[in-house]
Every structure is written in structure tokens, then in C-alpha cells.
Amino acid sequence: AVERTLSIIKPDAVAKNIIGEIYSRFERAGLKIVAARMLHLSREQAEAFYAVHKERPFFKDLVDFMISGPVMVQALEGENAVARHREIMGATDPKQAEPGTIRADFADSIDENAVHGSDAVETATQEVNFFFGPDELCARTR
Ligand code: CMP
């Protein structure tokens, strides 16, 4: 089925100036960008976005990192987009990521791991709606 998923290019990857490189990988994988915005997250936004991890020991470091610089946020659309996006990102920990994945190629650590992607179709809808209103999601029918 055609799905949408949320992608965040994290502050480490924005700082490395590889937004275009990562966008190329999305496009080569058949994922279309249907909304995009660069922003510098506030602490409140980062905490709300990652609320599911609130009790985890890495939560404070995660939030500090995510607000350390601007991020590029996009909604991606395509056949099986959630899983397809996860495949091209590679494992959360770059040491475990398959060669040729975004995290294997660009991430420095499990904390500074270049990209975020929704982990399931249900969370993808929530995460897309966290950043984008219905009028910001563009149809890509041609
Ligand atoms: P992300 O997909 O953005 O979701 C939560 C982030 O927490 C994750 O990527 C990692 O960058 C970070 N993180 C740090 N330590 C861990 C861990 N032990 N397990 C999962 N995520 C972690």
C-alpha cells in the first residue's frame, strides 16, 4: 500500500551539509517528499516528539542533541514507505547498520545517528501530523 512516513535529518547530518545526499537516497528508493521544513526544535517540541522515550536513560541526551542545531523534517510517500525508509536508514546503532545505509555511511554513534524515521504505520501518521497540517501535505500524482 502507499504509505507516508516521517523523516528527520538530525543536527549532525545538517551540520555535515548532506541534506541533498540524503534526499537523493530517498528519491532513488522511490520515496517522494510530500512536505518539508527546516526548523530549530525547541526543547518543548523535542520532548513532545520523543515523549514515548521519556523514561529511557538516554532521553535527556537525545533531547539536548535534537535541539543542538537545525533539523530538516519531511514527510515521505511511497509504496511500503515506512519499511522502505527504515531499510535505507539502517539500524539505529550505526555499528549494526548494513553497509550502504544512511547510518552506516554518515552516523557517528547511536546518539548522533543522522536520521530519524517512523517505526510503524500508526506512529508514522502521528509523527507526520506532529509537524505538518493537512494543507501542507502535497499530492504527488504526476
Ligand atoms: P531515533 O530513531 O530518532 O529514536 C530515538 C533515538 O534515541 C534514536 O534514534 C537514537 O538516536 C537515540 N538513542 C540513544 N540510545 C538509544 C538506545 N539505547 N536505544 C534506542 N535509541 C537510542
Image (spheres, helix red, strand yellow):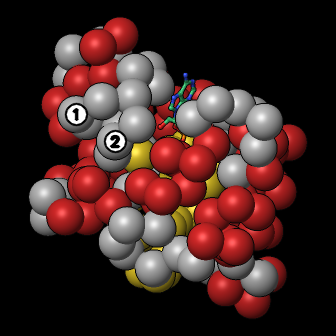
Within 10 Å of the Cα at label 1, are there few (<14), some (14-19), or many (20+) other Cα atoms?
some
The verdict on label 2 being within 8 Å of ligand 1 is: yes
Q: Residue 24 placed where, x, y %? A: 24, 53
Give x and y (percent) for residue 55: 78, 36
Q: What is the three-letter code of the residue carrying label 2?
A: Glu
Lateral position of residue 86 relative to residue 137, left or right: left
Q: Are marks 1 and 2 in contact (CB under 8 Å)?
A: yes
Nearest to the observer: residue 44 or residue 100: 44
Q: Position of residue 52 (x, y in %)?
A: 80, 42
Look at mark 2 in the image and give the residue it sits on: 112
Q: Is residue 140 visible?
A: no
Q: Which residue is mark 1?
A: 108
Q: Label 2's element? A: loop
Q: From the viewer's side, name the closer residue of 131 and 30.
A: 131
Q: How many marks?
A: 2
For the residue labelled by badge 1, is the local secondary structure a helix, a strand or a loop? loop
Q: What is the CA distance from the residue labelled 1 to the residue labelled 2? A: 6 Å
Q: Is residue 92 above or below residue 47?
A: above
The amino acid type, in three-letter code, at marker 1 is Asp
Looking at the picture, does residue 46 appear above or below residue 4? below
Indicate which quadrant contains ligand 1: top right
Report the residue at 62% width, 43% height from top. Answer: 59
Image point (70%, 73%), residue name: 44
Horizontal side of 123 relative to 8 (left or right) equals right
